[in-house]
Image (cartoon, rainbow, N blue to C red):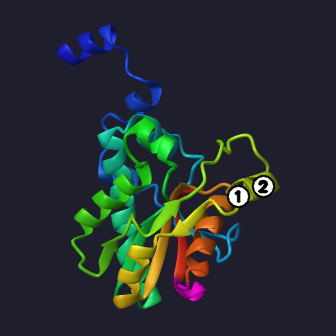
Amino acid sequence: MLAHLLDILFPPREDEAALRGVDAGAFLARLAPALVPATRPPAAALLPFRDPLVRAALHEAKYHGTERAFALLAAALADFLPDYLSELGARRATLVPVPLGRAREKERGYNQVAEVAKRALAAAHDPALVLAPELLARVRETPTQVSLAREAREKNMRGAFRAAPEALARERAAPADIYIVLDDVLTTGATLGAAVEALAAAGIDRGRILPVALAH
């Protein structure tokens, strides 16, 4: 009764309301990992963006920092990673969230991809998985890509990232078997492609850099 009254006084957002009552099991039923050849190398995408609940979770995580959205997306990532690493034969993996620009992260107060990754690794309880949000830095602010075509997106993202020297030195001292570059939504692959190029340019073996997106 109280919850109904609160909804009348403070109507929930459409996406927020859609996620109510959705538990991890129901969300995990939407997992459909697929290889998307838009990036070089091709990226693994976990969830179908066309699914309304997947879109709701991504929007709530990205624009509102909703804990339920973070938790659901983290559950999907935590479910996916062990099998993925097993298939690759990787003993140690470093997870690198795609960084936001400083202005955008300051405005939101968080990087939604890093928040999902942090919760996923906490749920996985796997010492072979390491989170390294500091390894990749965004060195150029980029305008939103929502309305841009593929070529414009690639031009927009070119040179937007670089590997951070101090973090890179630590990685070289104890390198991972693979580096998973993680983004939230894969459209043309321009952002993930630019992130992969930045790590490769810093000397990380391109064959050990794997792009992954939460949805496509």
* Residue at the spot of label 2: 150
Crowd tier of the residue under label 2, counting other residues whose Cα lies within 10 Å: few below 14, some 14–19, many 20 or above = some
44 and 209: which is toward the camera? 209
Position of 154 with respect to 216 (left or right) is right
Q: How far apart are marks 2 and 1 (CA)?
A: 6 Å
- Residue at position x 54%, y 80% from top? 209
Position of 150 with respect to 112 (left or right) is right
- Residue at position x 40%, y 71% from top? 95
Position of 127 with respect to 185 (left or right) is left
**Image disc number at residue 196:** none
Residue at the front extreme, as displayed: 165
Indicate whether residue 76 is drawn in magenta.
no
Indicate whether residue 204 is drawn in magenta.
yes
Which residues, given as a range, are shown in magenta?
203-208
Residue 160 appears in view = yes
Position of 155 with respect to 106 (left or right) is right
Marks 2 and 1 in Cβ contact (< 8 Å) = yes
As shown in the figure, which amino acid type bears the numbered disc 1? Thr
The secondary element bearing badge 2 is classed as: helix
**Image disc number at residue 188:** 1
Residue 1 appears in view = no
Q: Quadrant of the N terminus?
A: top left
The secondary element bearing badge 1 is classed as: loop
216 and 137: which is toward the camera? 137
As shown in the figure, which amino acid type bears the numbered disc 2? Arg
* 181 vs 72: above or below: below
Q: Where is residue 125 in the image (x, y as percent from the top left)?
A: 21, 71
**Mark sitting earlier along the chain (2/1):** 2
Q: Position of residue 130 (x, y in %)?
A: 31, 74
* 187 vs 207: above or below: above
Q: Where is residue 27 in the image (x, y as percent from the top left)?
A: 39, 51
